[in-house]
Image: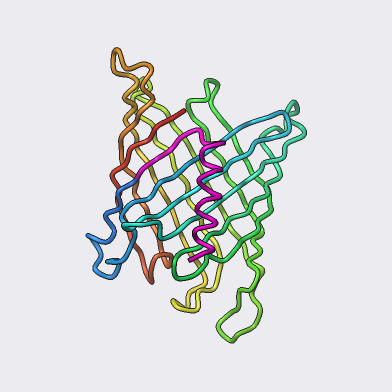
Amino acid sequence: MKRLIFLTTFLLLCTISVAQNIQVHYDFGGNIYKGLGNRPTVTTTAEMFRADKFGSTYISIDLDYNKQVTGAYWEIAREFCFWQNSKMDWLSIHAEYNGGCTTTGSFNNSWLAGLTYSGHSKDYSKTWSLSAMYKLIPGTKNSIGESDIHNFQITGAWGIDFANGWLTNSGFIDFWREYNPVLQKSYILLAEIQLWVNLNRIKGWDNIPLSIGSEIRLSNNFVGCGFYAIPTLAAKWTF
């Protein structure tokens, strides 16, 4: 619990200093699946993305609530592209860390490195990326108790503005290898697909950067054995 309190405080300070948008999601997983009755009902997400002459940085911070904070997750990813003015500007070197903890334990800390293909439309209304990475998960063991720290992950991410800016579709898909001793499974799929209605398109609301929408959280062997599709009701404020 002390570790969770410390991490939560740290992440909140990070949120205040770097966030470009903050999201609040009400999760319906516990209502749909009986086996997920203790699943947190609210998640807040803070995101930051910034590009520079050497590449880009992405930070995501999740806090889960069930009357109180029950979990915290942190992800930071860096793309290195020192050749942005060349014909190879679509390729970058990817480095990432992610981890976190809950009131009952901690997520496995993960260190990732690999290559990313990325692109965008001329007006940046459409962006996409695909990363193939080596994934190091210290302390992981396989089904017979041997060290199993060497893994992989493939990640796709996108953002699309359409309907004259009224709608935004964004999200990611992760597929990775990590042995789960409880589920006795080694391959995990996780995807979050968001659809937002941007209310600043309403006449007179130009200075109100509020969006409302939903997220579908798809997973296989992540929240439990097998496949889950969990919707949320969400709001987002963009700074």
Q: Which of 67/19 is in front?
A: 67
Left/right placement of residue 211 relative to residue 154 reads left
- Magenta-highlighted stretch: main secondary structure? helix
Q: Residue at x 36, y 55 (%)?
A: 65
Q: Which of 137/239 is in front?
A: 239
Is residue 97 shown above or below 17? below
Q: Is residue 220 magenta?
A: no
Left/right placement of residue 210 relative to residue 20 reads left
Q: In the displayed image of the protein, which residue is found farthest to the bottom? A: 144
Left/right placement of residue 119 relative to residue 238 reads right
Q: Quadrant of residue 179?
A: bottom right
Tell me how the rendering is colored: rainbow
The location of residue 81, given as percent across then percent down, is: 73, 36
Left/right placement of residue 16 relative to residue 77 reads left
Q: Residue at x 54, y 43 (%)?
A: 13
The location of residue 225, given as percent across then percent down, is: 38, 71
The location of residue 40, given as percent across then percent down, is: 34, 59
Q: How many marks?
A: 0
Is residue 76 shown above or below 22? below
Q: Residue at x 73, y 33 (%)?
A: 54
Q: Is residue 20 magenta?
A: yes
Is residue 116 shown above or below 189? above
Q: Which of 187/4 is in front?
A: 4
Q: Which residues are magenta?
A: 1-24
The location of residue 168, given as percent across then percent down, is: 39, 31
Q: Quadrant of residue 92?
A: top right
